[in-house]
Image (cartoon, coloured by chain):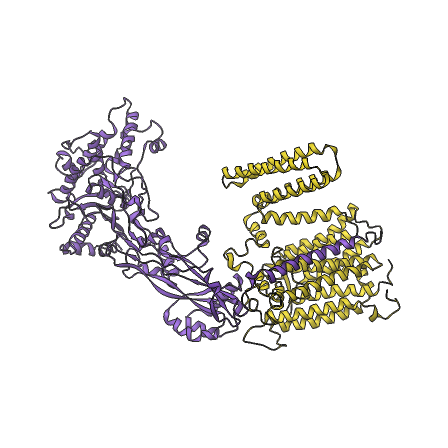
Chain colours: A yellow, B purple
Amino acid sequence: MANPRTSFIARLDWLTIILFLVMVGFGWMNVFASSRNEGTPGSLFDASQRFSKQFYFIIAALVIAIATLTIDGKVWSFFSFPIYAVTLLILPITILIGKEINGARAWIFIGSFTLQPAEFTKFATALAIAKLLSTYNFVVQKPRNLMQVGALLGIPMVLILLQKDTGTALVFLVFVLVLFREGLSWVFLFVAALAILLFVLTMLVPIPILLGVISMIALGLTWLYQRNLKFFYIGFLSLGGLFGLAFLGSKFLGSDWSLSRLFFLAAFLAFMIWLTIILRKRHNPLLIILLTWFGAIIFIFSVDFVFHQVLQEHMQSRINNILGLESDPLGKGYNLNQSKIAIGSGGFFGKGFMQGTQTSLNFVPEQSTDFIFCTVGEEWGFMGSLLVLGLFSGLIIRLIYLAERQRSTFSRVYGYSVASIIFFHFAINIGMTIGIVPVIGIPLPFFSSGGSSLWAFTLMLFIFLRLDTDRYQIVS
Amino acid sequence: MQNSNPNRKYVVGGIVLAVTLIYLLRLFYIQVIDKSYQLSSKNNSQLRVVEYPGRGMIFDRYGKALVSFEAVYDLLVLPQQLKPFDTLELCRILSVDPIELRESIKKAHDYSRYRQSAIVRQITPEQIAALNEKLYKYPGFSIQIRTQRKYPQSIAPHVLGYVGEVNQSDINADSYYQGGDYIGKSGLESEYEQYLRGRKGIRYMLVDVHNRLQGSFENGRYDTIAEPGRKLTTTIDAGLQEYGEKLLAHKKGSIVAIEPSTGEILAMVSSPGYDPNELVGRIRGKNFERLLNDSLNPLFNRATMSRYSPGSIFKTIQALIALQEGVIDEFYSVDCNKSIIGCHNHPNAHGLREGIMYSCNPYFYNVFRRIILQGKSTSVFKDSQIGLKTWYQMVCSFGLGQVLGTDLPGIKPGLIPDVAFYDKMHGVNRWAFSTIYSNSIGQGEVETVPIQIANLAAIIANRGTYFIPHFVKSIEGVDSIPEKFRVPMHTAVDTKYFDIVADGMQMVVNSQGGTGSRAQVPGVIVCGKTGTVQNSGRKEDHSGFFAFAPKDRPRIAIVAYVENSGAGGVYAAPIASLMIEKYLNGTITQTDKELSILEYKQF
């Protein structure tokens, strides 16, 4: 443990700062590679080029970093709610006077700059949540307190959704991790994860298959608990029989899926009744498995119903777009996942700096912003991917470690919030480029070109580093 | 409760590490294991090149080109590659408005920065030659070749139809189409779209870092080869069609000529028409607007869509049905008693042939009464119902009251009233023969469209059978025309009765006192019948005439209508006569008749 009396410089967590600098530096190399135009090299300081613009952004970010370190950490705790309020007030203004880019009204002009206020809402919300959770007598499990948290998260989400910037709005869901660390019941994490998983699966996987897989999992878990082979066989056979019947049903009923879905629903209801009879002993774990299983089925059907019957066509299309189901109906084998082709073509060692062809010819959309990882993958290969993933997971784990060593709840919660937000961006952004996660347009922190995102993440990170240097002083 | 859940840091950290691990495995798979993503580093970027095939040509029955195509060029832009350029120079070369050009580019940019969009369409070859030299100065722009329609004969606009850009519903209906594609919008262009359009080809090319072509992607595994559109040979006789359009110039009307032995449509004229070349290229929009707003309605195909009362032409059907039903014989005679129904002055008709020749209204009033009131019920209402039911079925067997299966979109069915129709109009048992007798002379509720009357001429020429009138003679690569055009249709009237009506129609044209003497053709026995369509008193009657010739082994069946021009014998009959002479003899000897028609101008 460092001595509280050592100098400020010594108390700074230099590992985090080094990770930050490496990420920003490597990020800029990739922005440079992806936004250079062949034929016209252009000056590094020519502000009309994206990479030189980004260079200035990085200089500004470093200034922000140093300035932030000089501000006393107590300021952030003290002003957390006012800062939160101010960033919230800017959002409606953006909706009114903002500039529309790619369908989202999320940018405002300051001179020739465009600024995306929603980026700053994230750290402001992190401050507010930290402040709320550190208040005396706050208990996460208390419904009243949970509702306060919900309000703090819900207001910016709704405002950002009104800007039609769905990606950024979704970021706020990641606070469930912070709350979990602070004592939120497992059930929330489990239900949230399951709901997200099921929603995406319902859209992507044919419903009968999904129902079958879920049922098999439920059956498997029950068997693990019961260790009763006879029971397992009965379940297995009846499930198989039901599938056979449903298969025949769908054959004879033609392509009218709604009928066969009804058939499925009825069959599974019967299956559930049969299970309940078996479970009269009221073993708790079995009941949980059963309820989860049945809840999942209901959820799948309601998602499907709402999606197809309630939502209008353009809303369906938007969701399909978000899920990447409709983004390029004509591409078929060719256009499908240009980003995967770019990354995949990188091989183990990559094509080398500025040698990427996929990315330089703009086959990948939003090349230097949301899809910057394609350039990494193409030009630096698997080694580059390994480096970037290592940097991110290293940073996040380091932040968790730092957060855990805080004595004040405020600093700890804030640290977890920073780690979680970076994690969410990292997981969604890279997952999207490699086709694991639906296409949701949020930037890769410290990598993607653009000022707002870089500055907001820098500010967010360095506030925490400053709080960390004060970890022996604040005892609240 | 400070730091009360210390173990949960492992859960959160575990989630982070798990996600990282899954992603690493995935990346390892797509970057190292799965070689399908690994293209050679030199040439691994694809360019999608769409090749538009030439649209199939359309020919007349003798192989003369009615519709051909010529190459035109579109200017494409890939917004992502745009650099500042000399807008004015480009606009000068293409003769487009700079503001329009900028707006098109902005639209293309908003649509997609990474997709090519056509911003200037249908550029002439001269402009392209000038542009090609300077294209290097305009990065992001490229030229795409397409073909556009050309009409060497400038005839038959309503039959051929026109081609236009697809709209959203076309794209929704058939995923083959993409925005900016062309589709047959009307006429044969629309009917035979599937054959005429061919198939677009898509080639995926590899380009290097400097956007130079490096050959095909994956040896053309994903490419589709463009297939040119099929040739369509029609049954139209271009010479006859052109002559018909000349005769109807400056008149409102239509002509349909059919070869009775096959059902092939030799000519279909609707006037006023337009030059099909007007609806091609960049002038199309402006001209279409003008034609659409023209009060004479030149886009409207009168030959298939104008619903007229058939008038006296309908008397031939009444005669045939009466003979078939046995309610009259060929010697049936009626005094011309004008007290029930008006008539013109003519000697009394002795026998059916003279009834047709004089077009005697009281005669056919009585014929129709005998058909409708056959005394099968004591109630005059019931009896009328029974009679009308039989009559309706027989009339329909002549292809009336229904859309003929002709290969042209938008044909109207006309109207033949049945029992249900009158029940709805007047109420059940509230109508009888006295209510509906106007139909006896083709007035009243019956309505027909000209192509049906031409078909009726073909039916009488064939003595009771017909082939569905059609335009298709052959399609390249297709063995035979659709079966429906090859199978004869039979009417409900026996062949023997048609000779009597044909005799009557011969007398209409060739005997002293016939109403259609102006339809005579030197050296040819023409059988015809006038039809004067009363026009609710406000305007002059429509003049109609239908005929076939020669009487034995007929080669042409024809109908001519001239709107608001008086009795059928005056203008419609000579037009039919000239058309018959033109088709049968190839030359016109009746120059006086021709001149009088050409000089008659309605507008």
- What is the quadrant of the C terminus of chain B in the image? bottom left
Say whether residue B21 is visible. yes
Q: Is residue A105 visible?
A: no
Q: Position of residue A149 (x, y in %)?
A: 75, 51
Residue extending furthest toward the front? A229
How many labels, in total? 0
Q: Quadrant of residue B592?
A: bottom left
Res. A110 image quadrant: bottom right
Q: Residue at x 14, y 42 (%)?
A: B506
Q: Nearer the viewer, residue B379 or A328?
A: A328
Q: Nearer the viewer, residue B119 or B261?
A: B261
| Extreme-top residue of the structure | B378
Residue A117, position in %: x, y?
68, 62
> Which of the 4 image quarters holds residue B344?
top left
Q: Seen in the image, is A342 located left or right of residue B347?
A: right
Nearest to the observer: residue B541 or residue B569: B569
In the picture provided, is B209 more to the left or to the right than B446? right
Left or right for A347, reference B234? right
Q: Position of residue B534 (x, y in %)?
A: 25, 42
- Seen from the viewer's position, the closer of residues B540 and A187 is A187
- Rendered position, A49 above or below A431: below
Q: Position of residue B109 (x, y in %)?
A: 52, 64
Q: Is residue B523 left or right of residue B282?
A: left
